[in-house]
Amino acid sequence: MNWLRALQHLQDHGLPGVLVTVAAVRGHAPREAGAKMVVGAEQAWDSVGGGNLEATATERARAMLKVSAHTPELLTLRLTDRAGNEHGRQCCGGEVTLLLEPLQTVRPHVAIFGVGHVGLELGRILARLPLHLHLVDSRAAQLTPERLAPLQGGEARLAVHHAPIPEMTLHDLPAGTHLLILTHDHAEDAALCDAALRRRDLGFVGLIGSSVKWLRFQEQLRREGHDDAALTRITTPIGVPDISGKAPAVIAVSVAAQLVARMEHDAAQATSSLPSSLPSVRPQ
């Protein structure tokens, strides 16, 4: 599998990887500038020159994967018999600079439950982001190809779920999925909130509606056995508080902004918990 197919493989399966490119060559080297390879957690595909050069690049790339690095870096290696190579000698006599780029192949999952006026507008916004976007509705008419056509062609990978019992779809969503509950039926909303609280591995859970609706839902959810701490996992009303407009497109913009802020916050939190730097690699 060449590097391009490997990149597609990682994207298709949501797996992390690093793209390694020969950025510059001075003197003699086993590969020319522009040669590429892809390094995954367990496999590597294609080649930037073999030997110490490639083994060092692979080791460095996997160190980046281990700490979920997001920033590209340059690695310069000398191919001489005087270089302190750890993986065998390469005596081509040149110097190679490699660019190591972490790939954005792991996409968050977002599920919109209820593809009515607001849900459709929200889908149009989120479809332009690099997400796995799930559209769930109990009404088949809301999910026709003609109606969802404006969502096609964006960055998101769409999954359409016609689910007469929407909460059953929730059980199949991967851990970390962000939920936006916007259905046409308060009974569906309540059932989804109950099901969401029974999964502790989900991300953001947002519910559309008024404070009166939420008061009623809290009573119902407590009767289902959820305590006050569990109820705090649901954000309602959803959307940026300072945006008060009620047009579907305005609500959608507000909800999308809140969701993106949450995802960026989560990413920053994950990064802050990692080591401040990778182990250093000196030019050889």
Image: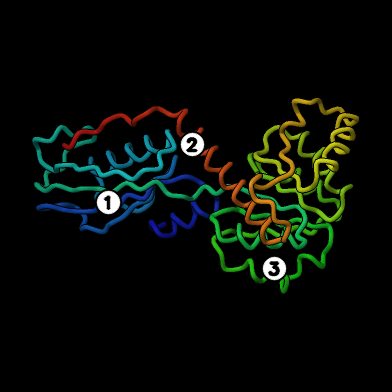
Residue 192, position as x, y percentages in the image: 81, 44
Image-based side of 59 in relation to 242, left or right: left
Q: Which residue is mark 1?
A: 48
Residue 205, position as x, y percentages in the image: 70, 41
Query: Mark 3 or mark 1: which comes first in sequence?
Result: 1
Label 3 and label 1: CA atoms lie apart by 43 Å
Q: Amino acid at mark 3?
A: Leu
Residue 283, position as x, y percentages in the image: 18, 37
Looking at the rendered image, the quarter that the C terminus falls into is: top left
Q: Which residue is mark 3?
A: 148
Q: Which residue is mark 2?
A: 268
Label 1 and label 2: CA atoms lie apart by 32 Å
Residue 70, position as x, y percentages in the image: 40, 42
Q: Amino acid at mark 2?
A: Ala
Query: Mark 1 or mark 2: which comes first in sequence?
Result: 1
Identify the secondary structure beneath mark 2.
helix
Image-based side of 271 in relation to 81, left or right: right
